[in-house]
Amino acid sequence: RRQRQMCIRDRERRVTMINILVKVKNVMNKILSAASVVLLVFMTSLVLWQVFTRYVLGKPAAFTEELVKYSLMWTAFIGAAYAFFTRDHMSLTIIKDKLTGNKRKILLLVIDVLILLLAVFVFVIGGFKLAMSARAEYSALLGIPRTLVYAVSPVSGIFIVVAQIINIYEDLTGVKVE
């Protein structure tokens, strides 16, 4: 009877954990996809405005080039974070496709742990240091602090870290968080 109660409690904890991870994943996916859409619409509008002012008005709007460049950086980093949540990122699957069973699970776990470490040390910590080192720098044309431009690295890094924690949970338990 006591063992059965422990099994029930353990099952309830797993269900609670999965529910939390599902909610986190859904919220993060919505945030990242909405941010990507907004950035893409913004960039498209800027490029169209640039073309219009250059070829129709004969006087190009200088600010658009810099804004498009920074928006593209943000879009790439935010899109990468989204790809880790959906596991749709580009990868070489030559070895993974040849493995089965536990060997495949171990490989996926090792890859996800390495990505987690990369996200923590390069994106979050390194990106934060980069953003802080650029506090006194401003963009040439718009005067935007470079810290805002480089802040995309730690921001996307945090999203990737959360995605990888969920991916590692899936690897270890075999339960798909959806």
Image (cartoon, rainbow, N blue to C red):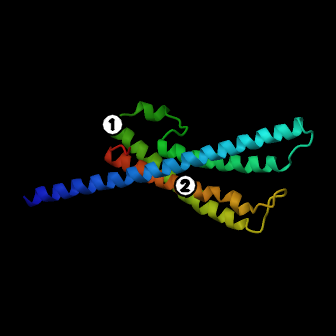
Q: Amino acid at mark 2?
A: Ala
Q: x, y (%) of residue 14?
A: 28, 53
Among the 4 quarters of the image, the one containing residue 8: bottom left
Residue on which disc 2 sits: 119
- The quadrant in which the C terminus is found is top left
Q: Would you say 60 lies left or right of 34 here?
A: right
- Find the residue positioned furthest to the left: 1
Disc 1: CA contacts within 10 A as few (<14), some (14-19) or many (>=20): few
The residue that disc 1 covers is 101
- Residue sitting at x 26%, y 57%: 13
* Earlier residue among tags 1 and 2: 1
Q: List x then y, in percent, for residue 33.
A: 55, 45
Marks 1 and 2 in Cβ contact (< 8 Å): no
Height in image: 43 above or below 9?
A: above
Query: Which one is in front, 150 or 91?
Result: 150
Q: Secondary structure at mark 2?
A: helix
Compare residues 161 and 30 and report the one nearer the observer.
30
- Say above or below: 121 vs 111: below
Mark 1 vs mark 2: in front: 2
Count neighbours of disc 2 (C-alpha within 10 A) and say few if under 14, some if 14 to 19, many if 20 or more.
many
Query: In this view of the protein, which residue sits in the foreground, 172 or 134?
Result: 134
* The N terminus, quarter of image: bottom left
Question: Residue 115, percent across and down?
Answer: 51, 50
Q: How many marks?
A: 2
Which residue is most to the right? 58
Q: Please name the residue shown 42% across and 43% down the image.
A: 108
